[in-house]
Image: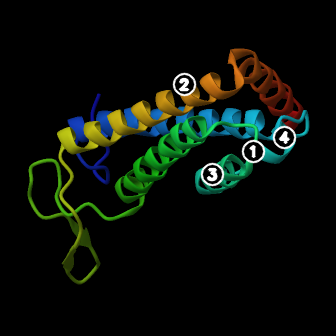
């Protein structure tokens, strides 16, 4: 299959970026689960549905800080996982939204105008760096779910999962 002329050539960075985007979506779901468990209401899924990652992180952190039924170690474990989510999401945003300074061959990336070409000023992301961010996202997500399960029990996370599934099905219709 031939590649259209206006697309860059296939490159391992794109596969790594696809994995990163998928893992970031899973982390966002984990944040919604955590939010629902922290709120502890059947209406939490309605509020969490459609919220962006940074909103979920900030509100989970606020709820964790004010959850007086958590022990200090439970609170700190959840907050540490949320901090890892925040850092991983920041790196994901840089990868997805910032200009990449090099193409697949390591050459400076350029934009072609009608009259001339313009070099893009951006970071040169390697496949290994992209994979490292994806791994950080996956690790942060696992740590968050583990911390929430430890604090509230697996049944609380299962209940949040059911509420989110019902809310998601309702949003489709």
Regarding mark 1 in the picture, which secondary structure is present there? Answer: loop
Are the residues flagged by discs 4 and 2 in contact, CB closer than 8 Å?
no
- Give residue 159's quadrant in the image: top right
**In the rendering, which numbered label is found on residue 68?**
1
Q: Residues within 10 Å of mark 3 (few under 14, many from 20)?
A: many
Quadrant of the rendering where the N terminus is positioned: top left
Question: Which quadrant of the structure image shows residue 31?
Answer: top right
- Of helix, strand and loop, which one carries label 4? helix
Q: CA distance from mark 1 to mark 4?
A: 19 Å
Q: Are marks 1 and 3 in contact (CB under 8 Å)?
A: no
Q: Nearer the viewer, mark 4 or mark 3?
A: 3
Q: Is residue 105 left or right of residue 111?
A: left
Residue designated by label 4:
44
Q: Dot 1, how many residues are within 10 Å of its Cα: few (below 14), some (14-19), or many (20+)? A: few
Q: Nearer the viewer, residue 81 or 53?
A: 81
Residue 19, position as x, y percentages in the image: 39, 32
Which mark lies nearer to you, 1 or 3?
A: 1
Asked whether the beta carbons under mark 2 and mark 3 sit within 8 Å of each other, the answer is no
Distance from the alpha carbon under mark 2 to that under mark 1:
19 Å
**Residue 124 drawn above or below residue 39:** below
Sequence-first disc among 4 and 3: 4
* In this rendering, the label closer to the viewer, 2 or 1: 1
Q: Are marks 4 and 3 in contact (CB under 8 Å)?
A: no
Q: Which residue is mark 2?
A: 146
Q: Residue at x 69, y 37 (%)?
A: 70
Q: Residue furthest bottom?
A: 115
Label 1, label 3: how many angstroms apart (C-alpha)? 13 Å
Q: Nearer the viewer, residue 70 or 105?
A: 70
Give 18 or 111, whichever is nearer the viewer: 18
């Amino acid at each position: 299959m031939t590649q259209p002329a206006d697309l860059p050539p296939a490159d391992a960075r794109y596969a790594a970026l696809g994995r990163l985007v998928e893992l970031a979506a899973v982390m966002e779901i984990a944040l919604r689960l955590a939010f629902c468990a922290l709120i502890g209401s059947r209406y939490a899924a309605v509020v969490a549905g459609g919220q962006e990652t940074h909103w979920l992180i900030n509100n989970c952190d606020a709820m964790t800080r004010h959850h007086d039924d958590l022990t200090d170690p439970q609170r700190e474990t959840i907050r540490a996982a949320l901090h890892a989510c925040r850092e991983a999401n920041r790196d994901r945003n840089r990868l997805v939204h910032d200009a990449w300074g090099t193409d697949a061959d390591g050459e400076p990336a350029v934009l072609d105008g009608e009259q001339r070409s313009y070099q893009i000023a951006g970071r040169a992301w390697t496949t290994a760096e992209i994979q490292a961010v994806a791994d950080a996202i996956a690790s942060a997500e696992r740590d968050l779910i583990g911390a929430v399960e430890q604090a509230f029990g697996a049944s609380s996370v299962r209940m949040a999962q059911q509420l989110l599934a019902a809310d998601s099905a309702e949003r489709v219709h």
